[in-house]
Amino acid sequence: MSEEIGPVRRVVRVITRSESQTLIAPLERQLTVTIAACALAREVAEGKRTPAEAREKMAGIEHSGDQLRARFVSKLTKVLVAPIDREDLFRLSRSIDDVLDNLRDFVREWDLFDVSTKDPYIGLLDATARALEDLHGAVQIIGRDPKKLTSRTALATKKSANEIRRLYDEELAKLFQRKLSMKVLKIRELLRRLDVVGLRLNEAADVLADAAIKRRA
Protein backbone atom coordinates (compact mmCIF):
# COMPACT_ATOMS: atom_id res chain seq x y z
CA MET A 1 0.00 0.00 0.00
CA SER A 2 2.75 2.46 0.95
CA GLU A 3 4.53 1.70 -2.33
CA GLU A 4 1.42 2.90 -4.21
CA ILE A 5 1.03 6.09 -2.18
CA GLY A 6 4.48 7.44 -3.05
CA PRO A 7 3.89 7.77 -6.82
CA VAL A 8 0.39 9.13 -6.25
CA ARG A 9 1.70 11.85 -3.97
CA ARG A 10 4.35 12.75 -6.52
CA VAL A 11 1.71 13.08 -9.23
CA VAL A 12 -0.47 15.24 -6.96
CA ARG A 13 2.52 17.49 -6.20
CA VAL A 14 3.23 17.91 -9.91
CA ILE A 15 -0.41 18.74 -10.64
CA THR A 16 -0.56 21.19 -7.73
CA ARG A 17 2.68 22.92 -8.79
CA SER A 18 1.42 23.19 -12.36
CA GLU A 19 -1.91 24.60 -11.20
CA SER A 20 -0.15 27.11 -8.96
CA GLN A 21 2.05 28.37 -11.77
CA THR A 22 -0.92 28.66 -14.12
CA LEU A 23 -2.92 30.54 -11.47
CA ILE A 24 -0.11 32.90 -10.47
CA ALA A 25 0.96 33.76 -14.04
CA PRO A 26 -1.71 36.47 -14.58
CA LEU A 27 -1.00 37.87 -11.10
CA GLU A 28 2.68 38.18 -12.03
CA ARG A 29 1.74 39.92 -15.27
CA GLN A 30 -0.62 42.21 -13.34
CA LEU A 31 2.40 43.32 -11.33
CA THR A 32 4.49 43.70 -14.48
CA VAL A 33 2.05 46.18 -16.01
CA THR A 34 1.84 48.04 -12.68
CA ILE A 35 5.64 48.35 -12.68
CA ALA A 36 5.35 49.74 -16.23
CA ALA A 37 2.77 52.26 -14.98
CA CYS A 38 5.17 53.40 -12.25
CA ALA A 39 7.95 53.86 -14.82
CA LEU A 40 5.59 55.88 -16.99
CA ALA A 41 4.62 58.11 -14.05
CA ARG A 42 8.32 58.72 -13.38
CA GLU A 43 8.88 59.73 -17.00
CA VAL A 44 6.15 62.34 -16.59
CA ALA A 45 7.67 63.61 -13.33
CA GLU A 46 11.08 63.87 -15.00
CA GLY A 47 9.65 65.72 -17.99
CA LYS A 48 10.68 62.94 -20.39
CA ARG A 49 7.12 62.39 -21.61
CA THR A 50 4.27 64.84 -22.07
CA PRO A 51 1.35 64.41 -19.65
CA ALA A 52 -1.17 64.06 -22.49
CA GLU A 53 0.89 61.33 -24.17
CA ALA A 54 1.45 59.54 -20.87
CA ARG A 55 -2.23 59.73 -20.02
CA GLU A 56 -3.14 58.01 -23.28
CA LYS A 57 -0.53 55.30 -22.79
CA MET A 58 -1.58 54.82 -19.17
CA ALA A 59 -5.15 54.09 -20.32
CA GLY A 60 -3.82 51.14 -22.30
CA ILE A 61 -1.73 49.91 -19.37
CA GLU A 62 -4.70 50.13 -17.02
CA HIS A 63 -6.89 48.22 -19.49
CA SER A 64 -4.30 45.43 -19.60
CA GLY A 65 -4.18 45.37 -15.81
CA ASP A 66 -7.97 45.10 -15.56
CA GLN A 67 -8.00 42.21 -18.03
CA LEU A 68 -5.27 40.37 -16.15
CA ARG A 69 -7.07 40.83 -12.83
CA ALA A 70 -10.31 39.50 -14.34
CA ARG A 71 -8.42 36.50 -15.73
CA PHE A 72 -6.77 35.87 -12.38
CA VAL A 73 -10.05 36.03 -10.44
CA SER A 74 -11.66 33.68 -12.96
CA LYS A 75 -8.84 31.15 -12.54
CA LEU A 76 -8.95 31.54 -8.76
CA THR A 77 -12.59 30.38 -8.66
CA LYS A 78 -11.82 27.30 -10.76
CA VAL A 79 -8.43 26.09 -9.56
CA LEU A 80 -8.44 22.86 -7.56
CA VAL A 81 -5.68 23.78 -5.11
CA ALA A 82 -4.35 27.29 -4.44
CA PRO A 83 -0.73 27.79 -3.28
CA ILE A 84 -1.89 30.07 -0.44
CA ASP A 85 -5.28 31.02 0.97
CA ARG A 86 -7.67 32.06 -1.83
CA GLU A 87 -8.90 35.10 0.07
CA ASP A 88 -5.31 36.28 0.53
CA LEU A 89 -4.64 35.89 -3.19
CA PHE A 90 -7.80 37.86 -3.99
CA ARG A 91 -6.78 40.64 -1.56
CA LEU A 92 -3.29 40.72 -3.05
CA SER A 93 -4.64 41.13 -6.59
CA ARG A 94 -7.02 43.85 -5.41
CA SER A 95 -4.18 45.79 -3.72
CA ILE A 96 -2.10 45.63 -6.91
CA ASP A 97 -5.10 46.88 -8.89
CA ASP A 98 -5.52 49.77 -6.44
CA VAL A 99 -1.85 50.72 -6.90
CA LEU A 100 -2.32 50.77 -10.66
CA ASP A 101 -5.49 52.89 -10.35
CA ASN A 102 -3.71 55.47 -8.20
CA LEU A 103 -0.73 55.66 -10.55
CA ARG A 104 -3.21 56.24 -13.36
CA ASP A 105 -4.84 59.01 -11.35
CA PHE A 106 -1.43 60.54 -10.61
CA VAL A 107 -0.74 60.89 -14.35
CA ARG A 108 -4.30 62.05 -15.07
CA GLU A 109 -4.21 64.70 -12.36
CA TRP A 110 -0.75 65.85 -13.45
CA ASP A 111 -2.24 66.50 -16.88
CA LEU A 112 -5.35 68.19 -15.47
CA PHE A 113 -3.46 70.36 -12.97
CA ASP A 114 -0.79 71.39 -15.49
CA VAL A 115 2.02 70.84 -12.98
CA SER A 116 5.55 71.69 -14.06
CA THR A 117 7.78 70.99 -11.06
CA LYS A 118 9.22 67.49 -10.66
CA ASP A 119 11.29 67.57 -7.48
CA PRO A 120 8.79 66.33 -4.85
CA TYR A 121 7.79 63.14 -6.66
CA ILE A 122 10.88 61.29 -7.89
CA GLY A 123 11.86 59.82 -4.52
CA LEU A 124 8.34 58.54 -3.87
CA LEU A 125 8.10 56.98 -7.33
CA ASP A 126 11.49 55.29 -6.91
CA ALA A 127 10.37 53.83 -3.58
CA THR A 128 7.19 52.66 -5.29
CA ALA A 129 9.22 50.92 -7.97
CA ARG A 130 11.31 49.14 -5.32
CA ALA A 131 8.22 48.00 -3.43
CA LEU A 132 6.64 46.67 -6.62
CA GLU A 133 9.81 44.75 -7.52
CA ASP A 134 9.91 43.25 -4.01
CA LEU A 135 6.26 42.30 -4.34
CA HIS A 136 6.89 40.78 -7.75
CA GLY A 137 9.63 38.61 -6.27
CA ALA A 138 7.27 37.44 -3.52
CA VAL A 139 4.57 36.52 -6.03
CA GLN A 140 7.12 34.49 -8.01
CA ILE A 141 7.92 32.56 -4.83
CA ILE A 142 4.21 31.82 -4.33
CA GLY A 143 3.98 30.40 -7.85
CA ARG A 144 7.16 28.31 -7.70
CA ASP A 145 7.39 27.18 -4.08
CA PRO A 146 4.95 28.74 -1.58
CA LYS A 147 6.72 26.94 1.27
CA LYS A 148 9.51 29.49 0.87
CA LEU A 149 7.14 32.39 1.54
CA THR A 150 8.14 33.86 4.91
CA SER A 151 7.45 36.95 6.96
CA ARG A 152 10.90 38.17 5.88
CA THR A 153 9.67 38.12 2.26
CA ALA A 154 6.79 40.38 3.23
CA LEU A 155 9.12 42.65 5.22
CA ALA A 156 11.03 43.72 2.10
CA THR A 157 7.84 45.05 0.48
CA LYS A 158 6.76 46.60 3.78
CA LYS A 159 10.06 48.45 4.14
CA SER A 160 9.82 50.03 0.69
CA ALA A 161 6.14 50.88 1.20
CA ASN A 162 6.95 52.60 4.50
CA GLU A 163 9.68 54.56 2.71
CA ILE A 164 7.00 56.02 0.41
CA ARG A 165 5.05 57.22 3.42
CA ARG A 166 8.18 58.63 5.13
CA LEU A 167 9.11 60.58 2.00
CA TYR A 168 5.54 61.82 1.72
CA ASP A 169 5.70 63.24 5.23
CA GLU A 170 9.05 64.94 4.50
CA GLU A 171 7.88 66.48 1.23
CA LEU A 172 4.63 67.62 2.84
CA ALA A 173 6.55 69.30 5.65
CA LYS A 174 8.64 71.19 3.08
CA LEU A 175 5.53 72.13 1.14
CA PHE A 176 3.80 73.57 4.21
CA GLN A 177 6.72 75.94 4.73
CA ARG A 178 5.80 77.68 1.49
CA LYS A 179 3.21 80.38 1.05
CA LEU A 180 -0.22 78.99 0.31
CA SER A 181 -1.00 79.11 -3.40
CA MET A 182 -2.84 77.17 -6.05
CA LYS A 183 0.45 75.54 -7.07
CA VAL A 184 1.03 74.34 -3.50
CA LEU A 185 -2.46 72.84 -3.40
CA LYS A 186 -1.86 71.00 -6.68
CA ILE A 187 1.42 69.57 -5.43
CA ARG A 188 -0.31 68.50 -2.21
CA GLU A 189 -2.92 66.54 -4.19
CA LEU A 190 -0.29 64.75 -6.26
CA LEU A 191 1.78 63.90 -3.20
CA ARG A 192 -1.31 62.51 -1.53
CA ARG A 193 -1.97 60.31 -4.54
CA LEU A 194 1.46 58.70 -4.11
CA ASP A 195 0.90 58.36 -0.37
CA VAL A 196 -2.20 56.29 -1.16
CA VAL A 197 -0.01 54.10 -3.36
CA GLY A 198 2.15 53.51 -0.29
CA LEU A 199 -0.92 52.57 1.75
CA ARG A 200 -2.04 50.03 -0.84
CA LEU A 201 1.44 48.50 -1.02
CA ASN A 202 1.44 48.23 2.77
CA GLU A 203 -1.80 46.29 2.50
CA ALA A 204 -0.19 43.95 -0.05
CA ALA A 205 2.73 43.37 2.32
CA ASP A 206 0.28 42.56 5.13
CA VAL A 207 -1.38 39.97 2.88
CA LEU A 208 1.99 38.30 2.32
CA ALA A 209 2.67 38.27 6.07
CA ASP A 210 -0.77 36.77 6.78
CA ALA A 211 -0.23 34.09 4.14
CA ALA A 212 3.23 33.21 5.52
CA ILE A 213 1.82 32.77 9.05
CA LYS A 214 -1.07 30.59 7.79
CA ARG A 215 1.36 28.28 6.00
CA ARG A 216 3.24 27.73 9.25
CA ALA A 217 0.10 27.17 11.32
Image: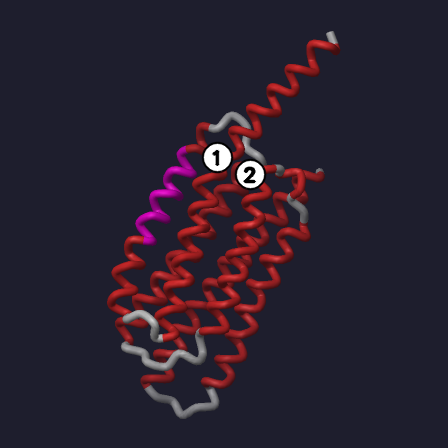
- Tell me, yes or no, whether the highlighted magenta stretch contains residue 68: yes
Task: Tell me what residue is drawn at x 58 percent, y 41 percent.
Answer: 142
- Circles 2 and 1 in contact, beta carbons < 8 Å: yes
Left or right placement of residue 69 versus residue 54 in this view? right
Q: Main secondary structure of the magenta part?
A: helix
Residue 187 tag number: none
The quarter of the displayed image where residue 4 is located? top right
Q: Residue furthest top?
A: 1
Q: Quadrant of the C terminus?
A: top right
What amino acid type is highlighted by mark number 1? Leu
What amino acid type is highlighted by mark number 2? Gly
Q: Where does residue 121 sit, x and y in percent of width and height?
A: 44, 74
Q: Which residue is mark 2?
A: 143
Asked whether the viewer can see residue 84, the reply is no
Task: Tell me what residue is drawn at x 37 percent, y 57 percent.
Answer: 101
Image: 103 above or below 1:
below
Q: Secondary structure at mark 2?
A: helix
Q: Which residue is mark 1?
A: 23
Q: Which residues are magenta?
A: 61-74
Q: Secondary structure at mark 1?
A: helix
User: Along the polypeptide, which appears first: circle 2 or circle 1?
Assistant: 1
The residues bearing labels 2 and 1 have C-alpha atoms spaced at a distance of 8 Å
The quarter of the displayed image where residue 116 is located? bottom left
Image: 139 above or below 44:
above
Q: Where does residue 119 sit, x and y in percent of width and height?
A: 43, 80
Q: Quadrant of the N terminus?
A: top right
Q: Where does residue 190 sit, x and y in percent of width and height?
A: 39, 73
- Tell me, yes or no, whether the highlighted magenta stretch contains residue 45: no
